[in-house]
Image (tube, rainbow, N blue to C red):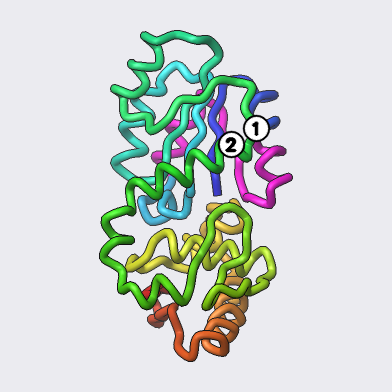
Amino acid sequence: MYIVVDERQGVAAEYVAGFSEQGVASRGVGAGEFGAWLGEHAESDIGGVDGFLLGECGERAAHTATIRRLSQAPIIALSETRSLAQTLDLFTAGIDDVVRRPVHVREILARAEAIRRRMNRAEMRAAAPQQAERLVVHFDGRDPEIDGNSMMLPRRERHILEYLARNRGRWLTKSQIFAAVYGDLASDVEESVVEGHVSKLRKKLRMRLGRDPIDAKRMVGYSFVG
């Protein structure tokens, strides 16, 4: 799930619609409400966010610092003008990337994935070579591959696999998975929805791999072990 922050409702709605067209969950939060929104959600909830898109917002630097205390998700700023000083200020504040409007949502997704790859490069190098060779998870809308062959998955299951793989080794709650896939941080999560998707996904992976790359613990959640 992506969070879009902008003081202009029309701009936020434009990008939320763009994410939806790409099959990616997102929600818009008004710039004046964003600080309170961050305060209302626990770190575990914010962990379900894949990225933040910050548009016109008077406190982008302060919000960036708060986000970074809660999450390592990519933070991308929208810029309206070519201003070197503004761009440098945004990078200094902790923004991961700055893009100039208009920009297509597909480019935003690609930039966010590039940021995640840089963040996770050390962990990816540490992964066992045979594991990396057998199961390859893409993050650009393509289905995963096992032994070089595409494994077609329903969209929800593919998004869950991508989210788990992106957070390799971390335990993720059903609430976090629900938020990442459905774009809803509501506290009352239908756990059976997540359980159903994950159960089907694990069964398919076991059939193709001969093992289960997703670990599960009752009352804890799920973890991608590769």
Mark 2 is on which residue type?
Answer: Glu
Q: Residue at x 54, y 42 (%)?
A: 110
Badges 1 and 2: C-beta atoms under 8 Å apart? yes
Give neighbour class at mark 1: few <14, some 14-19, many 20+ (Cα, 10 Å).
few
Asked where in the image residue 92 lies, by quadrant, the reply is top left
> x%, y% of residue 195?
56, 77
> x%, y% of residue 70?
33, 45
Magenta range: 15-40
Q: Is residue 108 left or right of residue 59?
A: right
Asked where in the image residue 44 lies, by quadrant, the reply is bottom left
Q: Where is mark 2, residue-wise?
A: 107
Residue 220 in sight in this render: no
Mark 1 is on which residue type?
Answer: His
The quarter of the image holding the C terminus is bottom left
Is 37 a magenta residue? yes
> x%, y% of residue 57?
49, 20
